[in-house]
Image (cartoon, rainbow, N blue to C red):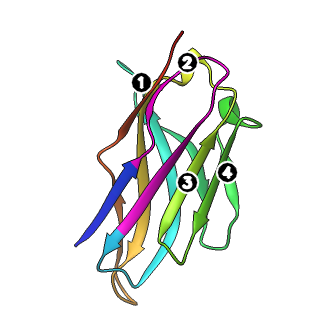
Amino acid sequence: QVQLVESGGGLVQPGGSLRLSCAVSGSIFKINDMGWYHQAPGKERELVAAITDRGSTNYADSVKGRFTVSRDNAKNTVYLQMNSLKPEDTAVYFCNANVMSSTYYSRDYWGKGTLVTVSS
């Protein structure tokens, strides 16, 4: 079994910053892509940022220049540094990881989510 546990969400004022963390544990042979998604009330879950095992990154247009995704492979952890936060960033943020449990089996796993609220 594989578990993803997010932390770092909370309430922040517009223009503020937060750093999310997601630790992956369990039966891990290798972690491929990792990423962050968010889901606002009444909307679908959508990609915020992703990072490959080699460090290549991809961002949603709405967060480019404000958010930075990174990972620590030794700690099996992915981070999302969020700066210049806006009220429209308010959502539940979910961590995602494609985890290989062996050389021939991999699947996507999700965390339970952490709420980010941007409000004055």
Q: Secondary structure at mark 1?
A: loop
Where residue 4 appears, x then y in whole percent? Answer: 34, 59
Residue 54 in the image: state x and y as whole percent: 67, 73
Mark identifier at residue 112: none
Q: Tell me where the magenta segment starts and ends, as one range.
A: 7-24
**42 on left or right of 15:** left
Nearer to the camera, 102 or 90: 90
Q: Earlier in the sequence, mark 2 or mark 4?
A: 4
Instruction: Answer left or right for 42 relative to 77.
Output: left
Among the 4 quarters of the image, the one containing residue 40: top left
Question: Which is closer to the viewer, label 2 or label 4?
Answer: 2
Q: Residue at x 34, y 42 (%)?
A: 113
Q: Amino acid at mark 3?
A: Tyr
Find out whether residue 8 is within the magenta segment.
yes
Q: Are marks 1 and 2 in contact (CB under 8 Å)?
A: yes
Residue 52 drawn in magenta: no
Q: Residue furthest bottom?
A: 103
In 3D space, how far apart are the residues under numbered discs 3 and 1 (Cα atoms)? 20 Å
Contact flag, marks 3 and 1 (Cβ < 8 Å) = no
Dot 1 alpha-carbon crowd within 10 angstroms: few under 14, some 14 to 19, many 20 or more:
some
Q: Which amino acid, mark 1?
A: Ala
Marker disc for residue 58: 4
Residue density around tag 4, few if under 14, some if 14–19, many if 20 or more, within 10 Å: some
**Residue that sits furthest to the right in the current view:** 65
